[in-house]
Amino acid sequence: MDFKINLHASICLDGKIFFDPFGIGKELPRKAEIVFITHPHYDHLSLEDIAKVADENTVFVCTADAAEILRGAGMENIRIVRAGEKFEVRGVKAEAFPAYNEGKPFHPKANGWVGYLAEYGGERVAVTGDCDATDDLAAIKCDVLFLPVGGKYTMNAEEAAAAALKIAPKLAVPMHYGSVAGTKEDGKRFMKALNGGVPCRLPY
C-alpha cells in the first residue's frame, strides 16, 4: 500500500482511496473510488478539491451533515455513517469511530463527527479526523495510524505521540500541521516524542 498526504489532513491510498481531500494539485487524476469525509469543516470537506479527484462513479462516505453539503453540490453515491458503525463499500471493510475534542469547542462529541478504520492493502488503516487523545481513540486497533499533531484544534505533537504509544501501530504518521494549524516542526516533535517506541514516517 502506497500513501500520500497532499496537504494538512488529506490522505490518498494508492491513488484510489481518499480521506478529506484538500490542497490537491494537478498531478492527481480524477479516479477516486471512495472519498471518506470525517466532518464538514472547510479543510476536510473541500468541494473544490473533491472535484479534482472524484467522478460520477466515486462513492462518498460521510456523516449526515457532510452529506447535505455534498448533495447541495450535486454529488451522488453517498453513504451516510455514524460513529460505531461497521460497513463495507466497494469491497473495502471499514468502521467509523468517534472523533472529538475534550476541553476545546471546535469538535464537540455531540456533533457525531468521525474517524475511520479501513481494511486496505492487507492493513488496518486508521484516519483519526480532528480529535484529542480520548479514550475512544486509545481503543482503536490498527496497523497504520494517521493522527493530528498541530495543536489548537486537535491534540499537539506530544499528546499525539502518547496516544500512538498506547495504540501501538506498526506505523504512525502525523498530519494536520504546517498549514491550517501548527508548524512543520510539529512532525519532528511528534517523532522525537515517540522516542523509537513506534515506527514513524513524516509526510513532509
Image (spheres, helix red, strand yellow):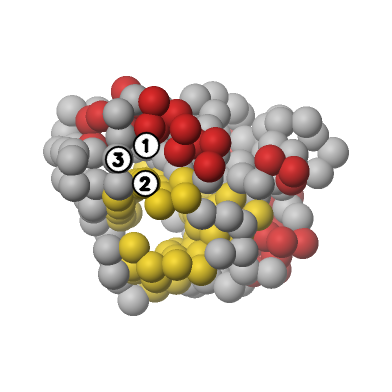
Q: How many marks?
A: 3
Residue 56 falls left or right of residue 105: left
Question: Does 185 sit left or right of 136 as displayed?
Answer: left
Identity of the amino acid at label 1? Pro
Quickly name the residue at label 1.
21
Q: Which mark is residue 128?
A: none
Residue contact at pointers 2 and 3, CB within 8 angstroms: yes
Choose top left, top right, bottom left or bottom right for residue 105.
top right
**Quadrant where the N terminus is found in the figure:** bottom left
Q: Amino acid at mark 3?
A: Glu
Q: Is residue 149 visible?
A: no
Q: Is residue 112 at all visible to an observer of this figure?
A: yes
Q: Residue at x 30, y 34 (%)?
A: 75
Helix, strand or loop status at disc 2 = strand
Which quadrant, please, contains the C terminus? Answer: top left
First of labels 1, 3 by sequence position = 1
Residue 18 rendering spot, x and y as whole percentages: 34, 47
Q: Residues within 10 Å of mark 1 (few under 14, many from 20)?
A: many
As drawn, the residue found furthest toward the right would be 103
Give the side of residue 28 with respect to residue 189, left or right.
left
Q: Secondary structure at mark 3?
A: loop
Kind of residue at badge 2: Ile
Q: Pick whichever, 78 or 25, lies toward us.
A: 78
Mark 1, secondary structure of its residue: loop
What separation in Å lies between label 2 and label 3 (alpha carbons)? Answer: 6 Å
Q: Which residue is mark 2?
A: 78
Q: Position of residue 79 (x, y in %)?
A: 40, 52
Q: Which residue is mark 3?
A: 76
Residue at (24%, 47%) from the top-left corner? 58
Given residues 14 and 51, the one toward you in this image is 51
